[in-house]
Amino acid sequence: MTFPASHKTVFVLDHSPEFAESCRQNVDFDIFTKSRGTGVIPLAPISKSLWTCAIEAVLEYCRIVFDLFPTGKLIRFVASDTESHLLNSWDADEQNLPHMAQSLARLGPPNENEDSSECSIMHGLASAVEVLCECSEKQHEVRTSLTEESSLIKNRGRIVCITSVKSDSHVKMLEEWVQDAITQHNKLAAGSDSLMPINLCELYLIHTMPLGVDSTITEDKHVVSSVLSSFIGASRSGRYLAHKLAQVVQVHFDLAITTITGIPMKEEQNASSSANYDVELLHHKLAHSDLVTFDSSGEMNTAMGLTLKWCTPRSNTIELQHCTGAFRVTPVDVISRPSSCLTNFLLNGRQVMLEQPRKIGAKIVSHMLTSHGGEIFIHCLMITRSTLEDPPSISEGCGGRVTDYRITDFGEFMKDNRIAPKESTVDVDIEDSPIMNVKSQLERQTRHWPMVISNTIVFNMLSHVDPLPSLITKVTIFDYKRTFR
Amino acid sequence: MPTIVLVDVSLSMARPLPPTDGGEEYQRQNLANHGITTLLDYIATHSRLEFTALAVYSSLWELIVPFTRDYNELKNGLLKLDVFDKTRLDVALQEVRSTVLEEWSPITPCQLVLVTDGRSGIGPGSFRHLFDNPKGSKEKSLPIPFPFPCKIQVMLICSQSEALQTNALGLSQKLIDINGGGGNVHIPEGPLGLKSVQQMFLKLAESTYAPFYGTLSCGHLKSDIQLAPAPEGFNVKHDFETITRTVSPEIEVCGFIDVSDICSPPTISRHLVLPVTTKDSNGKNKEEDEVEDGKAPSFCVLLHGSLKVENMCAIVNVGSDWYGILYSWADSKKKSNLMLGLVQPGDESISWLGKFSNLAPCTDFDSHPYGEDDTKTPFPVRPAEKRSYAQNSVVWVRASGLQADIQKVLRQARKLPDKQQAFYKELNRLRKAALIIGFYELLEGVAAMLERECTLLPGTAHPDAALQLTHATKQLRLSVERDVTHNITPLQTNFTNEND
């Protein structure tokens, strides 16, 4: 059990009047694609507030996490002004973007007229520590299970705080405040059944300021105590803050980027010509684990990014590839035209092979992009020599000299015994689960199943004895042959 | 898994043993050779599909026999070994690392059998030097831990007392620990001699290269099988649990599925499923029996043939809460065999199949899940929530996204009163996104744009267009005071019925 800190992340968002100020990055929202006649003056550009920029950056972070980790990674929002506002809980039905977005909409942006002396980020930080002590469903399940893991469980989490700080000493003060809060809440949790003391908290403090204002904060990371480590970062607001959080999410969840290059797409303006585009995809970094490269001095390259070239899909025949891993992906820029063309192509059921670009030599197809039930995965293919090459021939082994196996009949048998997923509403023991029905059906149907043609008479004269052999194997026999409606 | 036998051919290996009464004088190197031969014989008999390489090291290294299944070639290589000079382990380990990475992949598990007398040398390249300088010299980084999963088996050709003197046991264990891939230190039991060394190697062989025999069953159809390579136990730490499993010798088929539905799932290891007779597992095999075996029908061969023809796979249970897939696999030379791919232990390790325990036979459903004429399929299992790329996501981090969404609203506005639903749909989408991120300035800006559109309407425009635009402008400005779920609905006019 690793009990990662990525299991619980709490965002503490500064909802003070300071954040109602503009980020000073103007957006030209009134653009003319065709001339609308003379005398039409475009409306003045608008700008987003610091709050809006922070929310957009945080929502992108959440989009990436929920796309790549549908379960197991929980995120909470806490807004802080004169008090702290909890926008969702650890419950599974509140861990999705629509719910969190609705809570944000109802909270609204900061009130410019509020008394800023009453507002402080410290309320939010204290609440964040408090909620980290609350158990998630998974933690509660492990704690109350009667296994070895229940006593070894650790409670680790992260607090990501987006605010404006005045100086390095202000940062230090906030770190001490969080440390005190942890000490206090750990005491409370020790005496409670429903709370857990925090074993490790990673505090990420991101200082943000409008464009044109310089940062006076030193970026730093250090250990504050055995239960708290702190990472201080700074970023201008606007789209730079989203970019900063996009880098932070990769560190937090061990992600890497694969750039798919050479995607042929029809031009938007001109449907008859096509150009090649690149799309960046995010995924867990293990998808690159089988591609270790060395530089000239023999040092291993652990690059965070990899470029793979799109291979034009040849045909629709599906083969079973040897895959060593499959990981969910999400585009870095989900709304760009190349990204949505690629994702739609995959969601429509097409598979794409990806090759490593090479100047000389044969191409190596190392990965495959495909979608399963509306989720896009990158599969890692085995590209190196297989230890199973040159296997023994079947005809030389046991049963290899027999020539009259009932292959076609067994093929029919397999099709009759195909499986399908059944929805279950309750958890049952393995003995009562649907897969036991498959096993008992197989047992029933193989009570008499001759493997070779020369060992059976009945199955060689089916036209005379049908439908008796197939009826016998059924669990119940009706007067009339039952057909599927 | 591929094995490298790395033999120490430094001067200390040429030291003779104390002579026994009437016995021959052996050098340590002779003992090593005999021991390795024992090991190779075992592998050749029981795990002949394994690849093994032979290399030597002293102050340099040489790959005597590259990875091969030809055990005679390996044994001949042993006969050619010479004696060289001082022991330098770091060179050897570096070369092992690059050879394995060149030949196999960083995820192929390997085994290193290090045969040495425990005299780890002095100065650069010795064990001690390696451990005292973990960061390596400025030219190269330390060769271990290897970037691929590797077990190190250290075979010490020395007596127990000698090992204590040189601390061979401690240093060897430290080598294994730094690599972090597991393995053991082996030392001959009893006095150092031919028998004890051979015994030591045999013990290694039996623990590491023992073949896996089991049965494959599908209801009452059964076949005795061997899995090559033998599956390893599974021991991995996940976020909230440590999963430890071993493959059961009874492998049961629990259903069949089309290759197009299983969609190349990730497997943690693959094993050839080879039909054997019970005589094989007892170690005896006569030639006449082999001919007989060839003619007795085997379920394995039948299953393989049918899976290949129908392009299907079988789902098998290989242990408690652990499943695998059986399929027909052909190597580059088109020789096909039955292959078992083990997936991650767990009930939901392939998300698009749903839980394995929820897989039911077709007869359990009211309507046939594959359709009357095999026209549809119940797979893949869809998750409850859609991913961001499968929805009409709104991301305004870059201005282009915002501009595009505003243009969508305006385009629909200019078509009013036609396509009224589309206009309100786009407008509500924009309104909702602006409310979520608290971008109220945008709502005012778009309201102003719609007002302007109204003034730019030609005289020939339908009156409803102006009415809807004015209504939308007003509602947009009022959104700020209302709940986010309160959508803007079209204005009901006398014209509305005509437009629906």
Image (cartoon, helix red, strand yellow):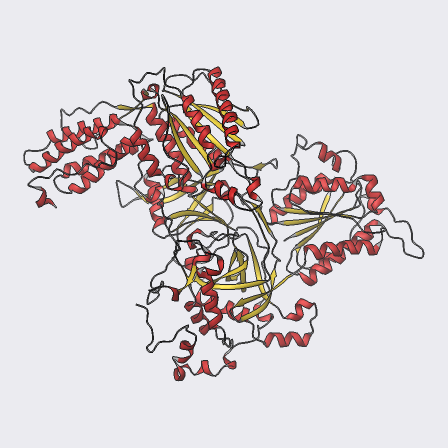
Query: Percent from the top left, x then y, of residue B384?
Result: 36, 48
Residue B434, given in percent of the width and then of the height, sits at: 27, 31
The answer to whether one can see residue B40 in this image is: yes
Image location (x, y in percent) of residue A118:
36, 17
Is residue B461 visible in the rendered image? The answer is: no
Up/down of A155 relative to B69, above or below: above
Q: Which of the 4 quarters of the picture holds residue A12?
A: top left
Which residue is at 72% across, 60% downward?
A: B42
> How many numbered marks, from 0 up?
0
Q: Position of residue A111 (x, y in %)?
A: 29, 21
Residue B430's quadrant in the figure?
A: top left
Left/right of residue B279 with respect to residue B494 in the rendered view: right
Q: Is residue B411 above or below residue B192?
A: above
Pick the residue in front: B407 or B434.
Answer: B434
